[in-house]
């Protein structure tokens, strides 16, 4: 049966798949608006983890017994699903990691050691998450390469002319966030990749916030690496993905040593396994990988067009009502924006907002969102942040605004 647009966006049915949403918090129905931190998980994901441990539990790629073969087949099947989901050429280009942070560290260490020489440059933007800053600082320190920061404008957009001025033949790596977790800005990554490649630089995209909101096509982007986390796309924690072009994954050295990543080991010499196994040392989070497959199926059952259309409606409704509040100070007003709103209410500390909204059952995030240099750029200590997912409703947006207005009346 083909579902119509309206059927697919039957939010009551969608919400029923997320048991955690059906609860009261501090005496009020939970309104979960902290999806950029982590999304909730549908039953299919939760049940798959339980199914794996109750029916298949075995180590993968090692055993010849039935359970081991079944576990391996399910695990490798997810690799195929991920490859299709982001339109990679082949499943060997998909490396399973612990998450975006782990994926970026892998690239910084492996690619960094492979290509960086003293005086070479690595370019990142001013809006990067700490996960896309610190690994580069570490490898630049080790290799004596120079880390350069692409500036952003008042709206929270990369100043592209500055990027073009900064990039040169000395630039060996560009690492850029696709969708900013603190601003919601959707960066022009395709354009940036074209420019970086003209000068021979390799490009890593931090996609932590992107795959649950828009279609990722690594072939069309032509990025060299793309990193994301399962838990931000309705999947389990502890599982992430690094996409890498075959030629690069084959060329760069492994990140960690151990079982599974080797072909042959002796005390004098070790040869490494083929990709992607060369980068998957030790027993992986098998249950989480299987859960990730169900998360992808969940997203595909609704469709990314429908998801982004719905989230955009939530974003527009919330932005319009927030703009009517006199004390509202948004951070991040890019023309290309995902369903994330960072803001301050003049005269109220964001932490107080978070605590008082929680008392009404409304979960938002407050603080620096692991982007301290970005907070410094905007001269704020932190912000309050709401971020939407497919299961949020327009009524929830209205209730959040109503609660916020009430708080402001009491506090100011
Ligand atoms: N942002 C947020 O509340 P991990 O923790 O490895 O799954 O993802 C790290 C990460 C990297 N890049 C971006 C753009 C991110 O948003 C995140 C995680 C969460 O915004 C936790 S700080």
Image (cartoon, rainbow, N blue to C red):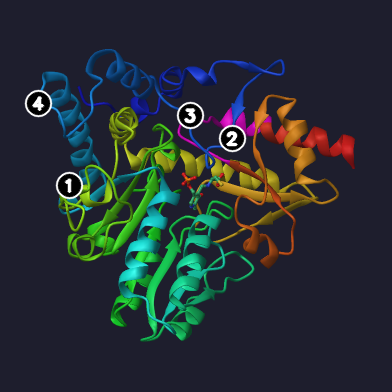
Secondary element at image label 4: loop
Viewer-nearest of labels 2 and 1?
A: 1
Q: Is mark 1 within 8 Å of ligand 1?
A: no
Earlier in the chain: of badge 1 and badge 3, it is 3
Question: Rounded to the nearest whole Å, what is the CA distance between mark 3 and mark 4?
Answer: 36 Å
Figure quadrant of residue 84: top left
Q: Residue at x 71, y 29 (%)?
A: 358
Earlier in the chain: of badge 3 and badge 2, it is 2
Task: From the viewer's perspective, tell me whether residue 62 is left or right of residue 380.
Answer: left
Viewer-nearest of labels 4 and 2?
A: 4
Q: Which residue is mark 3?
A: 40
Earlier in the chain: of badge 2 and badge 1, it is 2
Q: Position of residue 313 (x, y in %)?
A: 51, 41
Question: Rounded to the nearest whole Å, what is the CA distance between mark 2 and mark 1?
Answer: 34 Å
Q: How busy is the neighbourhood of tag 2: few (under 14 within 10 Å), some, or many (20 plus)? A: many
Question: Rounded to the nearest whole Å, what is the CA distance between mark 1 and mark 3?
Answer: 27 Å
Q: Judge by depth and name the residue closer to the eye, 54 or 266.
A: 266
Q: Position of residue 113 (x, y in %)?
A: 35, 69
Q: Which residue is mark 2?
A: 33
Question: Rounded to the nearest whole Å, what is the CA distance between mark 4 and mark 2?
Answer: 46 Å
Q: Which residues are magenta?
A: 387-399
Q: Is residue 157 above or below residue 331?
A: below
Earlier in the chain: of badge 3 and badge 4, it is 3
Secondary element at image label 1: helix
Can I make out residue 238 in this image? yes
Q: Which residue is mark 4?
A: 64
**Label ID, residue 264:** none
Can I make out residue 335 in this image? no
Viewer-nearest of labels 3 and 4?
A: 4
């Amino acid at each position: 049966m083909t579902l119509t647009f309206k059927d697919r966006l039957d939010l009551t049915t969608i919400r029923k798949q997320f048991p955690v949403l059906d609860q009261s918090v501090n005496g009020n129905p939970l309104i979960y608006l902290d999806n950029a931190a982590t999304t909730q998980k549908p039953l299919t994901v939760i049940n798959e983890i339980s199914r794996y441990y109750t029916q298949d539990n075995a180590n993968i790629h090692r055993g010849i017994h039935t359970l081991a073969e079944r576990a391996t087949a399910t695990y490798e099947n997810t690799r195929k699903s991920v490859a299709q989901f982001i339109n990679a050429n082949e499943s060997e280009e998909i490396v399973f990691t612990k998450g975006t942070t782990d994926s970026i560290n892998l690239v910084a260490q492996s690619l960094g050691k492979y290509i960086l020489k003293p005086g070479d440059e690595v370019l990142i933007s001013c809006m990067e998450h700490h996960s896309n800053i610190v690994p580069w600082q570490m490898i630049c320190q080790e290799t004596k390469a120079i880390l350069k920061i692409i500036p952003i404008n008042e709206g929270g957009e990369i100043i592209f002319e500055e990027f073009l001025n900064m990039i040169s033949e000395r630039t060996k790596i560009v690492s850029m966030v696709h969708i900013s977790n603190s601003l919601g800005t959707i960066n022009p990554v395709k354009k940036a990749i074209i420019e970086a490649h003209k000068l021979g630089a390799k490009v890593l995209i931090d996609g932590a916030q992107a795959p649950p909101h828009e279609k990722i096509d690594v072939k069309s982007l032509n990025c060299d690496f793309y990193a994301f986390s399962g838990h931000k796309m309705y999947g389990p924690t502890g599982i992430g993905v690094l996409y890498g072009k075959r030629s690069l994954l084959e060329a760069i050295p492994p990140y960690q040593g151990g079982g599974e990543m080797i072909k042959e080991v002796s005390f004098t010499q070790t040869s490494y396994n083929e990709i992607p196994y060369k980068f998957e040392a030790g027993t992986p989070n098998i249950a989480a990988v299987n859960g990730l497959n169900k998360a992808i199926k969940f997203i595909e059952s609704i469709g990314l067009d429908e998801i982004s259309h719905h989230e955009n409606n939530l974003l527009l409704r919330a932005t319009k009502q927030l703009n009517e509040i006199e004390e509202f100070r948004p951070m991040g007003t890019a023309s290309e924006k995902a369903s994330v709103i960072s803001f301050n209410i003049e005269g109220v500390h964001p932490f107080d907002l978070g605590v008082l909204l929680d008392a009404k059952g409304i979960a938002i995030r407050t603080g620096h969102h692991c982007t301290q240099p970005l907070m410094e750029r905007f001269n704020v200590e932190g912000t309050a942040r709401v971020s939407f997912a497919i299961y949020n409703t327009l009524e929830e947006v209205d209730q959040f605004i109503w609660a916020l207005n009430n708080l402001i009346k009491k506090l100011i």
